[in-house]
Image (cartoon, rainbow, N blue to C red):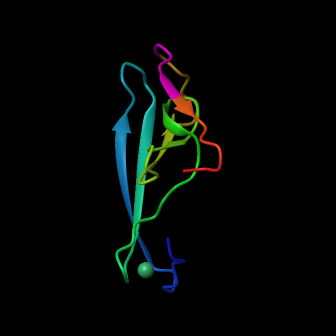
């Protein structure tokens, strides 16, 4: 796809979610250019995992799991991630 040439002007969308039967929270991040509306495509391991950030398989969303400071993980470990050679 063509290089993105607009001046940097991205509108970010943040959404807070809760991870299954655990106390993990996660922040979903999406972005799109305010000038041409082209979406940001995140890179990273695909999937959803309570232990580390991941991205949607199409790169449209990044997911950052977190706990508040001094919280300890409580729950059954779930989730998965897959690294895609060359990125996605
Ligand atoms: Zn643009």
The one nearer the camera, 25 or 62, is 62
Please give left or right for residue 24 compared with residue 16 in the image.
right
The percent coordinates of residue 85 (x first, y second) are 65, 43
Please give left or right for residue 14 compared with residue 88 in the image.
left
Q: Is residue 11 shown above or below 70?
A: below
Q: Is residue 78 shown above or below 51?
A: above
The residue lying at 44 percent from left, 39 percent from top is 26
User: Going by the picture, which residue comes out furthest to the right?
Assistant: 86
For ligand 1, the image quadrant comes to bottom left
The residue lying at 48 percent from left, 85 percent from top is 6
Q: Which range is magenta?
A: 75-80
The percent coordinates of residue 18 (x first, y second) are 36, 33
The one nearer the camera, 24 or 13, is 13
Q: Is residue 25 shown above or below 75?
A: below
User: Going by the picture, which residue comes out furthest to the front?
Assistant: 1
The image quadrant that residue 56 belongs to is top left
Q: Is residue 20 shown above or below 8?
A: above
Identify the main secondary structure in magenta: loop
The percent coordinates of residue 64 (x first, y second) are 50, 43
The percent coordinates of residue 12 (x first, y second) are 40, 65
Q: How many marks?
A: 0
């Amino acid at each position: 796809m063509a290089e993105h040439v607009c001046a940097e002007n991205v509108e970010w969308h943040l959404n807070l979610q809760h991870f299954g039967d655990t106390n993990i929270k996660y922040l979903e991040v999406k972005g799109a250019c305010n000038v041409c509306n082209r979406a940001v495509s995140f890179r990273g391991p695909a999937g959803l995992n309570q232990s580390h950030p991941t991205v949607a398989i199409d790169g449209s969303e990044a997911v950052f799991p977190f706990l508040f400071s001094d919280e300890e993980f409580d729950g059954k470990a779930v989730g998965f991630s897959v690294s895609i050679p060359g990125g996605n």
